[in-house]
Image (cartoon, rainbow, N blue to C red):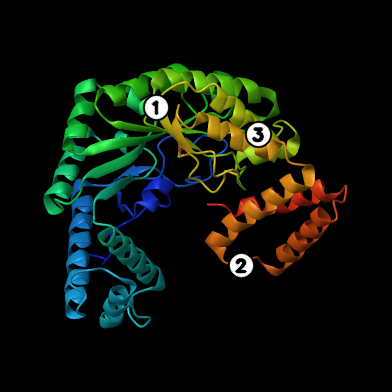
Amino acid sequence: MNPGYHEMGPIRPPSEGRDRSLLLRVTRNCPWNRCIFCATYKNKAYGLRAVEEIKRDIDTVSALAEGLKVTSWRLGLRGNITAEVVAYFVRRHPDRYGEGGAAPEVVRRRLESLYNVAGWLASGARTVFLQDANALQYPADRLVEVLQHLKGTFPSVERVTSYARSKTLARKAPDVLRRLRDAGLVRLHVGLESGCDEVLAFMQKGTTAAEHLLAGRKALEAGMELSEYYMPGLGGRRWSEKHALESARLLNEIGPHFIRLRTLVPRPGTPLLEKVRSGEFALLSEDEVVEEIGLFVENLHCRTYLASDQMSNLLWEVEGRLPEDKPAILQAIRSYLEKPLHERLAVQLERRLSSYLMVWGSLPPPLEREVEEAWESVRREDPAAAAKVQRVLERVKQAFV
Ligand code: SF4
């Protein structure tokens, strides 16, 4: 029986959120699931979804899209998908979306599915993201079949992307990658995290710098666009410099289209947070992370686009095309680091809180009080201000997504 929604996993890259991509789940969770800094799929079993199940999801999306378009025309909006169209559609189908119908969990999934489809249509139905953590693990023949059904159903789709682990990518034969590329999978997001083998081993990434290089080259040779994620702070105090230099060197060798910064935030429930608490891993301060990013950028010499499109990053202005924008990016880093301490603390509070509020809307009262105290301390240039801000930011960042 069709449940009335298409299944979606928990995350997608921020760039796919910005493009309002359709989320299509081909695998569930992560086949590796051992990186000690990652909590996304902890305690969740990995699995492949059946081709028929995914095709049924595509057909569900098609039916929802049709329903939304008909509703739009009925409202005189000429096929445009607006909030009014979605609200009307929901009201017209109380059996699907009303409280008296299905179980609350099913209704929640139906609404999420509908909002994803509506956002995707409103943005032109051009981009699709295959979930979850490593769609390349899906057998290539079957993935091609899924891609053909997707593109046959929605000829408007121009770009299909997915996450890929370097370990998996490095093992793929070049002709298999080209077949996937020709079938429509044109961009891969790879969690490089670091180009330093000590860091990769400590974090149990399950991949080496050499495999990252091979994987990146294979993706590019197959004609795919490549987006690599670098995680500032992942080397901690011990490897910060090496992490920055070796990551820059590796990325120079790969030459990806995009390098995306995703600063380390230790997540509750991860082995890394335990190591932080036990003193086995020393976290960098906000300022030290900015210094590390400066060293990283200084040593990047490849032609690429550097993006800071994740809420974990403090300085959103560390973004631009390289090498052209490198001087401006380095200047932005210098101007932050040259500010007096209380001004840097004010930037930290302001930026981190605005990211938090963007997602959650307001602060819970106990945290709000702590934030006010931290602000007061910064305004008075109190010597205890740095410690207060750090305490507050640790709590604020736990809620980052
Ligand atoms: S491979 Fe990616 S999703 Fe899987 S555990 Fe590591 S960071 Fe998390």
The earlier-in-sequence mark between 2 and 1 is 1
Category of crowding for the residue at label 1, using alpha-carbon neighbours closer than 10 angstroms: few (below 14), some (14–19), many (at least 20): many
282 sits left or right of 248 in the view: right
Category of crowding for the residue at label 3, using alpha-carbon neighbours closer than 10 angstroms: few (below 14), some (14–19), many (at least 20): some
- Residue identifier under label 1: 166
Q: Is there a contact, CB below 8 Å, between mark 1 and mark 3?
A: no
Measured as percent of width and height from the top left, residue 201 is found at 55, 23
- Please name the amino acid that badge 1 sits on: Ser
The earlier-in-sequence mark between 3 and 2 is 3
236 sits left or right of 387 in the view: left
The earlier-in-sequence mark between 1 and 3 is 1
Measured as percent of width and height from the top left, residue 25 is found at 31, 49
Q: Residue at x 77, y 58 (%)?
A: 375
Nearest to the eye among marks 2 and 1: give it. Answer: 2
- Residue identifier under label 2: 362
Front residue of 310 and 210: 310
- Residue identifier under label 3: 334
At mark 3, the secondary structure is helix
Measured as percent of width and height from the top left, residue 188 is found at 33, 35
Q: Residue at x 21, y 80 (%)?
A: 75
Q: Residue furthest right?
A: 383
Q: CA distance from mark 2 to mark 1?
A: 38 Å
Front residue of 194 and 200: 194
